[in-house]
Image (cartoon, rainbow, N blue to C red):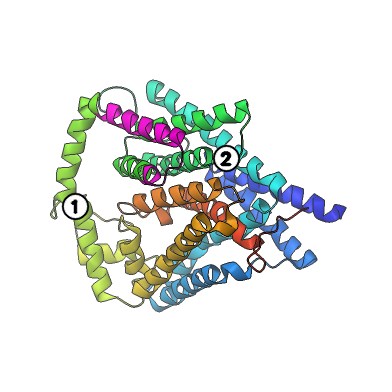
Amino acid sequence: MIYKKVLNDFLFFFYGLFIFCSTFSIAVAQIALGISSLLFIIIIIKFRYNPFPKALRIFYLMIAMYIAWAVISSLMGENSIGSIVLLKQEWLFMAIPIGIYVLGFEKYRNKIIFFFACGVFLVSIYAVIQHFTGIHWFKKTALFPAFDFGYRVKGFFPHRLTFGNYYAVASVFFIGYYFWSNKIFSNFEKKLYILTTIMGVIATLYSYSYGPIFALILSLFLLALIKDSKRGLIIISAGFILATAFYLFLPGLKDQIKTKINTEESITNEASRIYIWSNAVEMIEENPVFGVGPANFSDTFLKNKPDHRVHVHAHNDLLHLCAVIGIPGMVFWFGIWVMVLLYLKKYYFSSHYLFIDKKYCVAALAGSFAFFMTSISEATFSDEEVRQLLMFIWAVGLYPWALIDKKKIEPQSS
């Protein structure tokens, strides 16, 4: 049907634009996602497409329960309107069913990830130039100097930590995508994915953000544990060597890390994670069921600690969600993660799915793991730039489940 083909092609274009632009602009990316959502709704209505396949119902149920509880918690606290408004970012969940639909078409699947790689590669080049020159296009604020030479990069994002988190997640995604592939890539594709990985790792290191760097290293270790090729082991080892060399040959960085560790261990230092976490725990103890409300974290922090430094989130996703929407809301959120990991585990080990390229599963697993590691020291789930990337990564890992019919995978056609 020509009409359906045209709609699918437009949806593919705008969803591809969404993930490409997510590497440098949250505004353009979300405009593209908004247009994708409109097209997807038209497809659902016009062609009676079910966006919630039976195999993924528990996953979508956990998302629905999480959002429902967040709304209830917002209404129960002070400034309920402000809290409801802050929940607008939950619309990013739309990127999952849209991505699952688009990735279900073989002719679109690798092109989408190719667009993503192009964006990561181009912005990573800009980040390296940024490090050595200090240029900051389209921004009025100057970059902070690095510890020995150069500058701490943040691409086109508002903060270098956001940039580091995004590119750490993207880098390990491409390691899994390239080295666990059953497909023989063209020479151009090989060069693109290898260079994208290398440049993404370098860009992450040049952010000089410790959380993303440690998440990157831990993710490489995870990939080393599930390696199934010598080439995979080589690139993972190369990543370790690069990160180690980066640490050893920058004495200013080593000194800064030692200072940072001492700062984070202090319960009296108002900038330390321990200080922030302990005060978030106080909020949880006072409001364990409904939390203080998404819009009330900083006000409650100031109320509990007058004349102290105010923080807008708990610098830890689990603690932050417990504090703002209560322990039940955090449990539902954690349940979403559990379901994703269970789907990926079954996909990876089940013999039924061996002819589906394993690279999608490993890429999604590595990217999800890196994201979760960053969320230990930062409220990454509340950071829309990185959050929208996670939604795409989950779509990559979950799309095969939408093709399951009575335990048989049947590729879609247009």
Highlighted range, magenta:
222-247
Instruction: Name the side, left or right, on which 222 lies relative to 155.
Output: left
Residue 355, how many percent across, how many down?
62, 50
- Residue drawn at the location 38% of the way across and 71% of the way down: 331
Residue 360, how many percent across, how many down?
55, 48
Which secondary structure, mark 1?
A: loop
Instruction: Name the side, left or right, on which 39 lies relative to 377.
Output: right
> Looking at the rendered structure, which numbered label has been put on residue 270?
1
Which residue is at the front of the view, 228 or 374?
228
Mark in front: 2 vs 1: 2
Q: Quadrant of residue 232?
A: top left
State the CA–CA distance, disc 2 to disc 1: 39 Å
Magenta region, main secondary structure: helix
The magenta stretch spans residue 356: no
Residue 308 visible at all? no
- Residue under pointer 2: 116
Q: Are marks 2 and 1 in contact (CB under 8 Å)?
A: no
The magenta stretch spans residue 243: yes
> Looking at the rendered structure, which numbered label has been put on residue 252?
none
Residue 376 visible at all? yes
Residue 269, how many percent across, how many down?
15, 51
- Residue drawn at the location 58% of the way across and 41% of the way down: 182
| Vertical order, 85 against 399 (above or below) | below
- How dense is the environment of label 2, judged by Cα within 10 Å: few (below 14), some, or many (20 and up)? many
Mark 2 or 1 closer to N-term?
2
